[in-house]
Image (cartoon, rainbow, N blue to C red):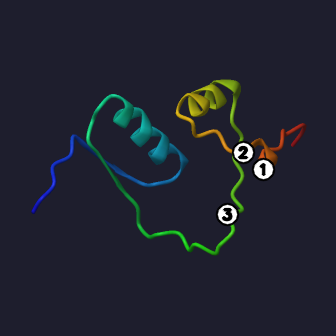
Amino acid sequence: MAQSFDICIRGAGVVGRTLALLLARERLNVALVANTAPAPEAADVRAYALNAASRTLLESLRSWPDAEHATPVTHM
């Protein structure tokens, strides 16, 4: 049986997942499509720099990571 979606998002990274959560909060039926499933044992070593507005948005979605793993950037 075919499924119907209001929107399809290609890419399950930070931006794709955040957009999917925002649209789902608006009661839209969202399909999130990724190239491959991440390896369950693999460590995620990516780093992101987020401003206060991004943090507020992620907190509102209950997606702000455990502060234990977050580190402020003081210089580059």
Residue type, numbered disc 1: His
Residue neighbourhood size for the residue with mark 2, other residues' Cα within 10 Å, grouped as few (<14), some (14–19), many (≥20): few
Which percent across, then down, holds residue 73? 84, 40
Q: Is residue 59 left or right of residue 34?
A: right
Instruction: Using the rendered view, name the quadrant where residue 76 is placed.
Output: top right
Secondary structure type for disc 2:
loop
Secondary structure type for disc 1:
helix
Residue type, numbered disc 3: Asp
Determine the CA span between mark 2 and mark 1. 6 Å
* Cβ atoms under marks 2 and 1 closer than 8 Å: yes
- Label 3: which residue? 44
Determine the CA span between mark 2 and mark 3. 14 Å
Viewer-side label of 1, 3: 1
* Cβ atoms under marks 2 and 3 closer than 8 Å: no
Q: Is residue 8 left or right of residue 1?
A: right
> Which mark identifies residue 66?
2
Q: Quadrant of the N terminus?
A: bottom left
Instruction: Using the rendered view, name the quadrant where residue 56 is placed.
Output: top right
Determine the CA span between mark 1 and mark 3. 11 Å
